[in-house]
Amino acid sequence: CNVGAKQPEEFGYYFWWGGTVGYKLNSAGDWVSAKDGKSFSFSSGNCLTYNKSTSQLQSAGYIDSTGNLVAKYDAATAHFGAPWRMPTAAEFSALISNCDTQWTTRNGVAGRLVKGRGAYSSKSIFLPAAGYGYWAAIYARTTGGNYWSSTPCSDSSNAWRLNLNSGNFLRDNHIRSNGRSVRPVR
């Protein structure tokens, strides 16, 4: 399941890259902290990793020598404990290269069914189209999904993500201050 979800088709919480609190929409459709219910918006001013180079991220203790988030800033580890963690950009590439995907619905929720090949053909996961948070709104919910990796880009504002919709299943990068889902691995 996504962090903050109880079932594979639930969207769960949304995180800015390097954030561990998690945010959700309340009944009025406003972003609130999953921790204390306080109002929030996904903006560059609220994202502590925004506009920081990889060397600045490493100096500030956000990433380790491998270039990935340390446990303290990893949303999966923060919510589930070690050995759970966010996938790396390289692991997203491996998932794309070694799996077949299909746009489908599960319990009425659109998303991508990801099935392994060969010895892993009996293994699968469902990634719901949870959309993403930007400022005070949610976009592409039910038509697309974005999942953070633990790997920043070398520029000062983006990180690698898994991007999915009815026509695509790919790894690309986007601005760290947007709210995205996290699917933990171990």
Image (cartoon, grey):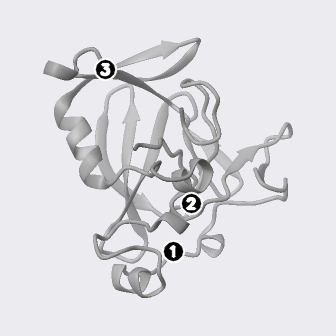
**Mark 3 — residue?**
123
Instruction: Judge left or right: residue 12 versus residue 24.
Output: left
Q: CA distance from mark 3 to mark 1?
A: 36 Å
Point out the tag, 1 or 2, that comes first from the N-terminus: 2
Answer whether residue 115 is visible to the viewer in this image.
yes
Position of residue 39 measured from the top left corner of the image (x, y, whole percent): 82, 58
Residue type at tag 2: Trp
Residue type at tag 3: Lys
**Mark 1 — residue?**
50
- Mark 1, residues whose alpha carbon is within 10 Å: few (<14), some, or many (≥20)? many
Position of residue 111 measured from the top left corner of the image (x, y, whole percent): 46, 24
Q: Residue furthest left?
A: 118
Q: Residue at x 58, y 47 (%)?
A: 80
Task: Look at the image and tell me in which quarter the C terminus lies.
Answer: top left
- Mark 2, residues whose alpha carbon is within 10 Å: few (<14), some, or many (≥20)? many
Q: Residue at x 31, y 52 (%)?
A: 172
Position of residue 70 measured from the top left corner of the image (x, y, whole percent): 45, 68
Residue type at tag 1: Tyr
Q: CA distance from mark 1 to mark 2?
A: 9 Å
Position of residue 38 measured from the top left corner of the image (x, y, whole percent): 84, 59
- Mark 1 lies on a secondary structure that is loop
Give the image quarter of residue 88: bottom left
- Mark 2 lies on a secondary structure that is loop
**Mark 2 — residue?**
16
Instruction: Judge left or right: residue 151 versus residue 142.
Output: left
The reply to whether discs 3 and 2 touch (Cβ–Cβ < 8 Å) is no
Instruction: Judge left or right: residue 12 versus residue 40.
Output: left
- Mark 3 lies on a secondary structure that is loop
